[in-house]
Structure formats: structure tokens, C-alpha cells
Amino acid sequence: MGKKTPLPPTYLFTAIVVMVLLHFLFPIVEVVPYPWLLLGCVPLIFGITLNLIADKAFKQNHTTVKPFEESTSLITTGVFRLSRHPMYLGMVLILIGIAMLLGSLLSFLIIPVFAVLMDVIFIRAEENMLADKFGDTWQKYQAKVRRWI
């Protein structure tokens, strides 16, 4: 049996745990003071909403949300008009919101690491699969809509 790659929510949960641990174990620099840290609710809620909307679009189009599984349709409407990967964008927004709520510098350092991991582990492979499956339709969509925002 081959090695199974954890799904993106596992990486998200791990990133959140690491952020919280860093915040409490190494509270070196506070970069977002109270009450401004409460503004972290905005990207947190927006990120959750973006993920829910994108997930609903996958279900409505009867295609998979799981990476590395073959898509049955290419979604280019709704939140997919703004980002080719709104769920990964939503996850990054969730992390930004949590980092703001925590307010400490080390929490913010996890965000670019998470984004790079999503790009290297999932996004590149997903886009290659979509290019193979949808050809010219994918190429036109890719030329029109950015990967993140």
C-alpha cells in the first residue's frame, strides 16, 4: 500500500495548533495589540465562508473536492471567478484571522509556510490534472483567473 498524503484540512489544523503553541510557548513580540486583534474575526469568518461556498459549488457540480481525485467538471463561476483555488485561499484567510486574534509575531510566520506547502503539495498537481482533463477550456480559465487572488 502506498503512502497516503494527508488532506489539506489536516495541514490547516496542524498549522493552527502550531500557531497557538508558538503564541503561548514563545510570546516574543506582540504585533497586533488589543482591541485591534479582534479584527482577526473578519478574515477568519471570510475564510470559513469562502470554503463553505466553494465546497457547495463542488457538490452542486457533482465533482470531487479531494485533491488527486479526477474532477468531473471544471467550475469557473461563483467564487471560482475570483480565484482558481478559493478553498486554499479561504484556509490562508482563516490562518490570517487566527494569527491576528493571537496577535504575536511567530503566529504570522506559519502562514507563508502553509501557503507554499499547499502550492507545492496540492495546487501544482491539481492544475496539471485539470490541464490534462479539460485542455483548452482549462487554459482559457487559467489565463483569465489568478491562482490565489
Image: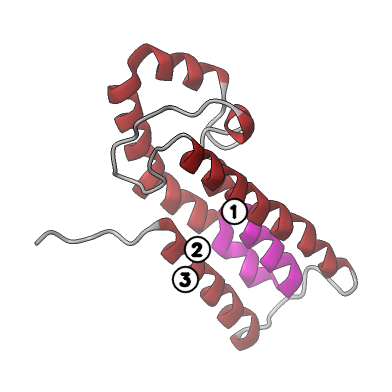
* Kind of element beneath mark 3: helix
Residue in view at x 32 percent, y 39 percent:
125
37 left or right of 63 in image: right
Q: Are marks 3 and 2 in contact (CB under 8 Å)?
A: yes
Residue in view at x 77 percent, y 63 percent:
40
Amino acid type at mark 2: Leu
Coloration of the structure image: secondary structure
Q: Which mark is residue 13?
A: none
Residue 82 magenta-highlighted: no
Total marks shown come to: 3
Residue in view at x 58 percent, y 73 percent:
19
Residue 96 magenta-highlighted: yes
Look at mark 1 in the image and give the residue it sits on.
92
Instruction: Indicate whether 54 appears above or below 128.
Output: below
Distance between mark 2 and mark 1 Cα atoms: 9 Å
Look at mark 3 in the image and give the residue it sits on.
14
Q: Position of residue 130 (x, y in %)?
A: 35, 28
Q: Which mark is residue 12?
A: 2
N-terminal-most mark, 2 or 1: 2
* Kind of element beneath mark 2: helix
Q: Which residues are magenta?
A: 91-111
Q: Quadrant of the N terminus?
A: bottom left
Q: Can residue 90 be seen in the rendering of this structure?
A: yes
74 left or right of 33 in image: left
**Of residues 45 and 16, the one drawn nearer to the viewer in this rendering:** 45
Q: Quadrant of residue 99?
A: bottom right
Residue in view at x 29 percent, y 37 percent:
70
Magenta segment, prevailing SS (helix, strand or loop): helix
N-terminal-most mark, 1 or 3: 3
Q: Position of residue 132 (x, y in %)?
A: 28, 23
Q: Quadrant of the C terminus?
A: top right
Distance between mark 3 and mark 2 Cα atoms: 5 Å
